[in-house]
Amino acid sequence: MAAAPVWSVDPRTGKQREQVAVEATAQEVDQAVRAAHAARGALADRTVRAAFLRSAADQLQAAKDHLVEAADAETALGPVRLTGELARTCFQLRAFADIVDEGAFLDVVINHPDDTATPPIPDLRRYKVPLGVVAVYSASNFPFAFSVAGGDTASALAAGCPVVVKAHPDHPALSEMVAAALRRAAAEHDIPAGVVGLVHGFEAGVELVRHPLVAAAGFTGSVRGGRALFDAAAARPVPIPFHGELGSLNPVVITEAAAAERAEAIGSGLAGSMTLGVGQFCVKPGLVLAPTGAAGDRLVKSLTDAVSDVDSGVLLDHRMRDNFIAGVAERAELPDVESPVTAGAGGEHTVSPGFLTVPATKLAAEGEHDLLLEECFGPLTVVARYEDESEAQAVLSRLPGNLTATVHLSAEEAAGEGRGAEILAELTPLAGRVLVNGWPTGVAVAPAQHHGGPYPATTSTSTSVGGTAIERWLRPVAYQGAPEALLPAELRDDNPLGLPRRFNGRLER
């Protein structure tokens, strides 16, 4: 594998700014993974682990101005958006520290022997242990929250797993700065720097998922890239879990009653959601089922007015810009597709938002319009106009898995009148998060959050956001008949660590 320079590139001009590093060789990937593997023991103490996560948040917060400046130079996402995303990242690290302190994620269960049971129950003690080194593949569109210190890294470290991060080529300089901040935090607690490894380059990413000491992987990116890595993870002599977020259309259903009740508000809300961050959110609403008729026409007019007022923006890199322009043009050329607001090139380096409309019947059966059922990354959405409920249902029945699915109901429908509950039931198999009268952009970091969904939204049933993301990097182990003196402290009867647990069938907190 020949080493190549890694450049920081200005997305506003497409020009190289500075050389950041070189692409990692196979030997360097091996060294990073072995250093991470050697650091496992330093994360064994939960108190140290939690303190490390809090120090990581502190280090990132202390370097906020420099980090935001570097992130904006490489992504053009803007200081306001990036400052908020960095705050979210720090919050997430501290939230996982609290989870580590609490200890419920260990799922401790103890059963004493019971000879009266059928069959008899021996002494059994079960909890969860870390998998080992986790490979993390950074996302382009969230340079903080889904990158070097993002949710995959934070949850893996919280589980007790060192990480080796494959930096995203769109923000290599920022990746180096964030990794350095995490290593400074590690040093505060005598944790080896290898606990957070960082490598650059496409081939390095492939070498990483194949390394025999890598025990699991987390990925956020395209269907094509994610599926290739997923297949590589499965083809290893010892397959490993691959938790990938790949792509999502995020359908929205607007009932006729909802459109009649508040068409203008729904139209403007949709415009704000689909253009947020220049349409580069993984939960951007990409397909909207809206009724025909006067109410639907009002909605489309509101959407037209709102999208027309949105300025053109810079995508994360010129490859994405080229793909967006080509994707819009290919979709707009399909029969019976109209462009009330034409999306495409907004300038030499920018893109302008827009949307397409199409009769829902064109999407109800397999054909050339299937392209409209594929995600187009950028500020574009497709509005499919349906005549009746059966047409909307026919389109929904053809959709693949998604991160989100949304329905907009009228006040009466939301109160239980009409088909509100039925529509919710129809959307539930399609997505990991189902919204009512809201918009999917914005993923709260909360214990009840689920950011995942059926394939191709993700390759597993897990979430990458929220406290339960830690479960991806753990495996259960049970001890049978082990003497008390030999057991881990987590599984002893006297509970010296004060952990929440289930003890002989009773939940103890």
Image: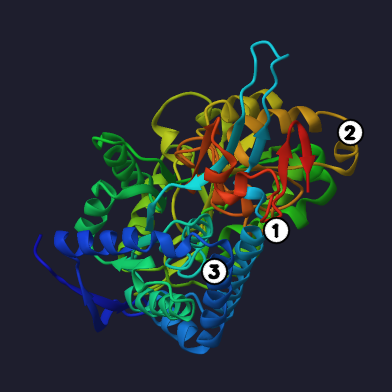
Q: Secondary structure at mark 1?
A: helix
Amino acid type, residue under disc 3 in the picture: Val
Relative to 493, is 50 on the left or the right? left
Residue on which disc 1 sits: 269
Mark positioned earlier in the residue sequence (2 or 3)? 3
- Where does residue 423 sit, x and y in percent of width and height? 73, 31
Residue 418 visible in image: yes
Residue 153 placement, left or right of 111? left
Report the Cα–Cα distance between label 2 and label 1. 23 Å
Q: Are marks 2 and 1 in contact (CB under 8 Å)?
A: no
Secondary structure, mark 2, is loop
The image quadrant where one finds the N terminus is bottom left
- The mark lying in front, picked from 2 and 1, is 2
Is residue 279 positioned above or below 295 on the image? below
Label 3, label 1: how far apart the Cα atoms are = 45 Å
Q: Which residue is at the front of the view, 46 or 292? A: 46
Q: Amino acid at mark 2?
A: Gly
Residue occupying image coordinates x 43% and y 65% = 42
The residue that label 2 is drawn on is: 416
Residue 271 position in % (x across, y down):
63, 59
Check the image and report above or below for 292 versus 9.
above
Q: Which mark is residue 48?
A: 3
